[in-house]
Image (cartoon, rainbow, N blue to C red):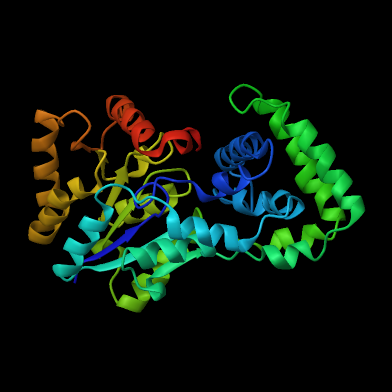
């Protein structure tokens, strides 16, 4: 039995749905970039009860304030481009008897249309509940004023240079001011599927399928995936970083940088044939010859102390595939 679980944003679809939703109102992109950096800072610090990807809970007040509808996220999922090669790879794997899963931090209204288009059964998808309509019912004029002031402060922060100011201001807003409002309770109940929650979702799938993590292949690319990648790699499964950033590569068994997800097939065929040993042999052989322009750059990462050469290639191709979303953690 061959089992593979993909992250959605990056490996299967290049767009960042939350980022695109925030762009639907003025200065929303800038606000999202700052909050996304705040998410990185809290994750790297290891804040208790905070998981990478909780950004999707933190932006809900702003989406509600600007009248964004759940249906807009659904429409994006129905129309969004797919990562080149994703449709072909999943079709090929299904024809070979693979079981396909997806664990995504994305809102459910976005994740389900995309995975449905790719032929991944809904029962094999774990993603984030998005009760935006419920939150909107709690709006009051006092809270409008708080959000308006907060937006004014956030847009004056630089997500690349103002880490200290970002941390101080957003700590004050999210953990002191917001809990005093009716939104505080709702926000605390939204649990985006990132970090540890991705591991929990994978363990649930693992239990259902009756196969330990050593039998699984997982594919991720960012800070929300590193705990899942690490768990599978430590279990001697196969943790693959695809066009990944510096938060995912160090925790992966191997990396693939390519404009086409289909280039992963050679690795998965080796896994079918001889498990991790065969994969290591194939990847190291390909690593010596290198990729071809923007395709097929493979790196064996397990035991590698210096990921810098791989990271430079991943960053370059990540920008090609993910465009604006590439700059997010």
Could you say where residue 183 lies in the image, as x and y percent from the top left? 79, 58
Q: Nearer the viewer, residue 329 or 320?
A: 320
Q: Is residue 276 above or below residue 201?
A: above
Q: Is residue 210 above or below residue 299?
A: below
Q: Is residue 74 above or below residue 298?
A: below
Q: Nearer the viewer, residue 297 or 18?
A: 18
Instruction: Judge from the rendering whether residue 63 lies leftward or rightward of residue 1; answer left or right.
Output: right
Name the image quarter holding residue 294: top left
| Residue at image coords 35%, 73% | 121
Name the image quarter holding residue 91: bottom left
Q: Nearer the viewer, residue 215 or 140?
A: 140
| Residue at image coords 32%, 25% | 312
Does residue 193 appear in the picture of this structure?
Answer: no
Could you say where residue 211 lies in the image, as x and y percent from the top left? 28, 72
Name the image quarter holding residue 20: top right
Could you say where residue 135 lies in the image, as x and y percent from the top left? 74, 63
| Residue at image coords 10%, 53% | 270
Instruction: Judge from the rendering whether residue 148 lies leftward or rightward of residue 223; answer left or right.
Output: right
Quadrant of the frame with the N terminus: bottom left
Does residue 201 appear in the picture of this structure?
Answer: yes
The total of numbered circles placed on residues is 0
Could you say where residue 246 lies in the image, as x and y percent from the top left? 41, 34
């Amino acid at each position: 039995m061959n089992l593979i679980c993909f992250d959605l944003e990056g490996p299967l679809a290049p767009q960042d749905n939350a980022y695109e939703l925030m762009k639907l109102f003025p200065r929303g992109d800038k606000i999202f970039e700052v909050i996304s950096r705040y998410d990185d800072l809290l994750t790297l610090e290891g804040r208790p009860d905070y998981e990478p990807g909780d950004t999707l809970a933190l932006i809900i007040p702003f989406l509600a304030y600007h009248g964004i509808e759940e249906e807009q996220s659904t429409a994006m999922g129905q129309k969004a481009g797919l990562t080149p090669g994703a449709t072909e790879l999943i079709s090929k794997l299904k024809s070979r008897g693979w079981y396909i899963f997806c664990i995504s931090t994305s809102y459910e209204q976005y994740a389900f249309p995309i995975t449905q288009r790719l032929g991944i059964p809904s029962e094999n998808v774990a993603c984030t509940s998005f009760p935006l309509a419920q939150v909107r019912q709690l709006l009051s004029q006092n809270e409008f004023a708080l959000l308006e002031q907060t937006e004014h402060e956030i847009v004056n922060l630089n997500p690349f240079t103002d880490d200290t100011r970002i941390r101080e201001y957003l700590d004050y807003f999210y953990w002191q001011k917001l809990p005093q409002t009716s939104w505080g309770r709702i926000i605390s109940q939204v649990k985006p599927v990132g970090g540890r929650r991705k591991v929990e979702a994978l363990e649930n799938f693992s239990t259902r399928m009756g196969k330990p993590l050593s039998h699984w292949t997982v594919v991720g690319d960012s800070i929300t995936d590193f705990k899942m990648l690490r768990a599978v790699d430590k279990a001697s499964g196969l943790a693959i970083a695809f066009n990944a950033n510096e938060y995912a590569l160090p925790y992966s068994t191997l990396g693939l940088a390519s404009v086409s997800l289909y280039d992963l097939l050679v690795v998965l065929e080796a896994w079918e044939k001889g498990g991790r040993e065969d994969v290591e042999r194939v990847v190291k052989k390909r690593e010596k010859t290198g990729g071809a322009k923007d395709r097929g750059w493979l790196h064996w990462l397990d035991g590698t102390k210096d990921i810098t050469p791989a990271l430079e290639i991943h960053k370059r191709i990540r920008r090609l595939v993910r465009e604006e979303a590439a700059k997010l953690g």
